Image (cartoon, helix red, strand yellow):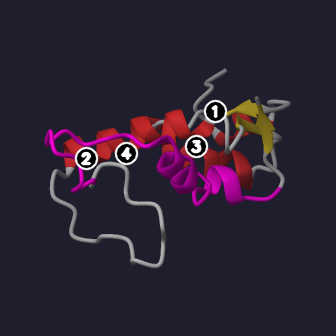
Amino acid sequence: ENLRTFKAWASFRAALCLPMFEFQMMLYDFYALSLPVFVPHPTSRLPSFIHKSLRALEIAHPTHGVIPPDSFQHKYPFLDSDDPSGQHSQIWDSLRAWSMLSDYALLPHLRHFQ
């Protein structure tokens, strides 16, 4: 059977969804099929995946037109103007804060693994 159809996916008992740019829409497909979806825990495992996604976004779009409002205390992890070396710093607290804003952390009924 072709595993790329929604009919095949609906026959699964659960899905493991790792937040990688290439698989971004699969989370919503599995979620819409009411499959139990396992995702990385928002504060312990998810930030490293968010880091990879943001890094891919930075490579694809080197200049960002939208900077988060000043009311959000955590800077976008790759726009740290205080970095004297010119290298973009990856601040774990910022990554964790950004990951908490993602659907992987906010959608109800997702199951998080450590």
Disc with the residue nearer the chain's start (4 vs 3)? 3
Determine contact: label 2, label 4, CB under 8 Å.
yes
Tell me the tag on residue 26: 3
3 lies above or below 37: above
Determine contact: label 1, label 4, CB under 8 Å.
no
Q: Badge 4, how many Cα within 10 Å: few under 14, some, many 20+?
A: some
Q: Badge 2, how many Cα within 10 Å: few under 14, some, many 20+?
A: some
Tell me the tag on residue 71: none
As helix, strand or loop, the secondary structure at mark 4 comes to helix
Q: Is residue 107 magenta?
A: yes
Disc with the residue nearer the chain's start (2 vs 1)? 1
Q: Which residues are magenta?
A: 80-108
49 lies above or below 25: above
Determine contact: label 1, label 3, CB under 8 Å.
no
Name the spot of residue 65 as percent of width and height, x first.
21, 69
Disc with the residue nearer the chain's start (3 vs 2)? 3
As helix, strand or loop, the secondary structure at mark 3 comes to helix
What residue sits right under mark 2 in the picture? Answer: 58
Q: Gap between marks 2 and 1, in whole Å?
A: 21 Å
Classify residue 19 by image quadrant: top right
As helix, strand or loop, the secondary structure at mark 1 comes to loop
What residue sits right under mark 4 in the picture? Answer: 54
Report the residue at 37% width, 57% height from top. 76
